[in-house]
Every structure is written in structure tokens, then in C-alpha cells.
Image (cartoon, coloured by chain):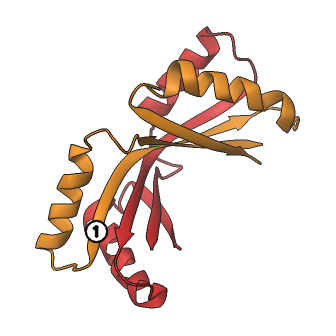
Chain colours: A orange, B red
Amino acid sequence: MKAKIVITPKKAVLDPQGKTVQTALEHMGYEGVNDVHVGKYLEIELEGDDTEAWRPKIDEACHKLLSNPVIEDYHFTIE
Amino acid sequence: MKAKIVITPKKAVLDPQGKTVQTALEHMGYEGVNDVHVGKYLEIELEGDDTEAWRPKIDEACHKLLSNPVIEDYHFTIE
């Protein structure tokens, strides 16, 4: 079983890495790129197959360790 | 329209960041975490709604700029 977690900067937070990628894409000739957000992606391999038991644990781990809830949002799926 | 890109280290490549997260989760008392992989996530907001026209461009951008194809895999969706 795998948890797939996506962590992104909140909309109101400056995302200099995203801006840099956007500028680089424009310099490479890609037109029509309106905005870029750069975040983190985590894949956690879990023992067992009890999705519902893992869900609150993964949520807690995201909140306490994996993301910074002040400036980042997260969402995850377990499958 | 948005392209959502996930970039992960190839399986054969050492992932020290993933190992660090795994160790931290174990120290926090989470049991049953078998493996952790840490990658990047990008959201690119695109003009227009021609998914098929964007697909090869995004693929090229992933290959040339956003990922390191020697040590990383990527996949993306456009929606």
C-alpha cells in the first residue's frame, strides 16, 4: 500500500522557485505559461492494507513533520 | 488548464532525503513505514485548452529543464 502526498505552497505565499521556472520556460521559448508552482511529492510505502487506519496517521505526519502548515497545503491519497 | 508534473528519483538511485524522512517517522513512533521516496511536484498553469498541443511541449520541458533524466523519472497529466 502506498500513500502519495503532494505539498504545495499556499496561494498567498511567494514562490520564488516557481517564478524562476516560469522565467526559464519563457526564455526557452515556451509561450502561454501563466503561472508555475513548485512543491514536494512524497511516496510512502506502508505495511498492511488498512487504508482507514493509516489515513489519520498520514494526516498527522503531514501536519507535524512533512509540511509547514503555516505556508504550505497538502493533500494525499492512500491506495 | 493545468499541467501537474511529478518527478521522482529512479528506483536504483540513492534517496537520502527519503531515508531521512523514514527514520524521522520511525523516531516519531510510526510503525510499518517500509520505504519513503521524496520527489518534486510542479503545477503549471497553461493558456488555452488544447491538451494535445501542450503534451509534447510539457514532455520536452520535463526532459530538458525540469528533471534530470539520468537519475529521475517523471510523469504528468494535463487537465
Which is more toward the observer, B49 or B21?
B49
The quadrant holding residue B59 is bottom left
Which is more toward the observer, B2 or B57?
B2
The quadrant holding residue A25 is bottom left
- Numbered marks: total: 1
Q: Position of residue B10 (x, y in %)?
A: 48, 53
Q: Position of residue B52 (x, y in %)?
A: 47, 89
On the rendered structure, is A38 left or right of B15? left
Read off the residue under disc 1: A34
Q: Considering only vertical position in the picture, is B3 above or below A68?
A: below
Q: Mark 1 lies on which chain?
A: A
Instruction: Provide the secondary structure element on which disc 1 rests.
Output: strand
Q: What residue type is labelled 1?
A: Asn
Which residue is at a point 16% across and 71% down the rendered structure image?
A26
Q: Where is residue B17 in the image (x, y as percent from the top left)?
A: 43, 31
Which is more toward the observer, A40 or B34?
A40
Whether residue B38 is visible, yes or no, is yes
